[in-house]
Image (cartoon, rainbow, N blue to C red):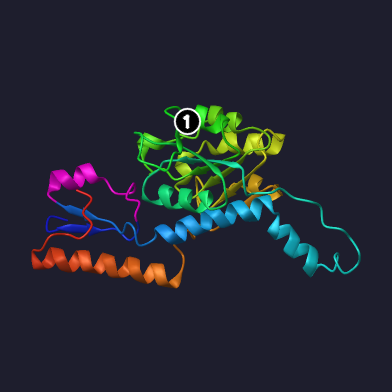
């Protein structure tokens, strides 16, 4: 494609684009950051609530007639006041942290560098972060640098009462280790919007009652998808007009 000038990505993550090759060919790359932060952060909090309060099971309990028939619904777990860790305190990670802080949680985080926060605890080591929290929310960028960043050691450190929430990329978590830990009870639960080979989700997940599964719909609202499309088109228009790109990657 010798006349290619710009690749305007529909989404914030651009790990599927060879940016180095684009640089070498003089091709500009853009993405759609910020406009989807709220939706993704909302879903992360929702999956955590849904997993700990067993909302899917509660819905089924009502629909099946079990509640009307006098069957008690088992007690679940309190969410507020626990310890939450954010793996990757970028734009989306920060919005997730702000939401969980509103649940009176003690906030911890791991990032490439320490950030300015309202007293949240920084962990230089991801295993140390996992060992220090009840909930671990993965908000890393995708790509080779973060492949299996949430390793078997991180998952084991989170422990049998811990919950892993992933709204980043399926590649960031060692999925085999996650499944092993969930099946063996060495991890309390998970909420997953992304998977290693999506949309073909490992069938082992289907048998697990302690997991909330979502179809990679973090930004999937009418309002946000419209805003993403507008930003994508605005970047293309700026390129064609010779103006500065709104959200350049390179």
Q: Is residue 102 above or below residue 112?
A: below
Give the residue at x 35% y 38%: 115
Where residue 133 appears, as percent x and y from the top left, is 57, 36
Out of 175 and 135, give the one closest to the viewer.
Answer: 135
**Which residues, given as a range, are shown in magenta?**
12-26
Q: How packed is label 1: few (under 14 Cα within 10 Å), some, or many (20 or more)? A: many
Out of 236 and 88, give the one closest to the viewer.
Answer: 88
Give the residue at x 85% y 69%: 65
Out of 185 and 147, give the one closest to the viewer.
Answer: 185
Q: Quadrant of residue 84?
A: top right
Q: Is residue 25 magenta?
A: yes
Picture mark count: 1
Q: Residue furthest left?
A: 242
Q: Is residue 94 above or below residue 63?
A: above
Residue 45 appears left or right of 203: left
Q: Quadrant of residue 118?
A: top left
| Image quadrant in which the N terminus is located | bottom left
Where residue 94 appears, as percent x and y from the top left, is 41, 48
Q: Residue furthest right?
A: 70
Q: Residue furthest front?
A: 119
Give the residue at x 65% y 51%: 51
- What residue is shown with label 1? 126
Residue 24 appears left or right of 118: left
Q: Quadrant of residue 19?
A: top left
Secondary structure beneath label 1: helix
Q: Is residue 65 above or below residue 167?
A: below
Residue 4 appears left or right of 11: left
Where residue 197 appears, as percent x and y from the top left, is 50, 47
């Amino acid at each position: 494609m010798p006349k290619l000038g710009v690749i305007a990505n529909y989404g914030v993550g651009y790990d599927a684009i060879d940016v180095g090759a684009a640089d070498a060919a003089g091709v500009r790359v853009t993405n759609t950051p910020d406009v989807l932060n709220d939706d993704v952060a909302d879903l992360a909090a929702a999956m955590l609530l849904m997993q700990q309060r067993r909302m899917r099971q509660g819905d089924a309990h009502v629909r099946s007639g079990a509640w009307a028939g006098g069957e008690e619904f088992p007690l679940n777990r309190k969410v507020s006041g626990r310890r939450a860790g954010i793996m990757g305190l970028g734009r989306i990670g920060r919005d997730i942290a702000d939401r969980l802080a509103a649940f009176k949680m003690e906030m911890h985080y791991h990032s490439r560098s320490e950030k300015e926060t309202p007293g949240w605890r920084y962990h230089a080591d991801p295993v140390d972060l996992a060992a220090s929290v009840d909930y671990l929310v993965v908000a890393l960028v995708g790509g080779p640098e973060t492949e299996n960043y949430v390793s078997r050691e991180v998952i084991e450190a989170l422990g049998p009462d811990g919950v892993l929430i992933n709204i980043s990329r399926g590649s960031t978590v060692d999925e085999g280790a996650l499944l092993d830990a969930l099946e063996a009870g060495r991890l309390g639960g998970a909420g997953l919007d992304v998977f290693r080979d999506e949309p073909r989700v490992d069938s082992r997940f289907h048998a697990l009652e302690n997991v909330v599964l979502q179809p990679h719909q973090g930004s999937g609202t009418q309002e946000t998808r419209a805003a993403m499309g507008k930003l994508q088109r605005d970047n293309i228009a700026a390129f064609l007009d010779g103006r500065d790109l709104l959200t350049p990657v390179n």
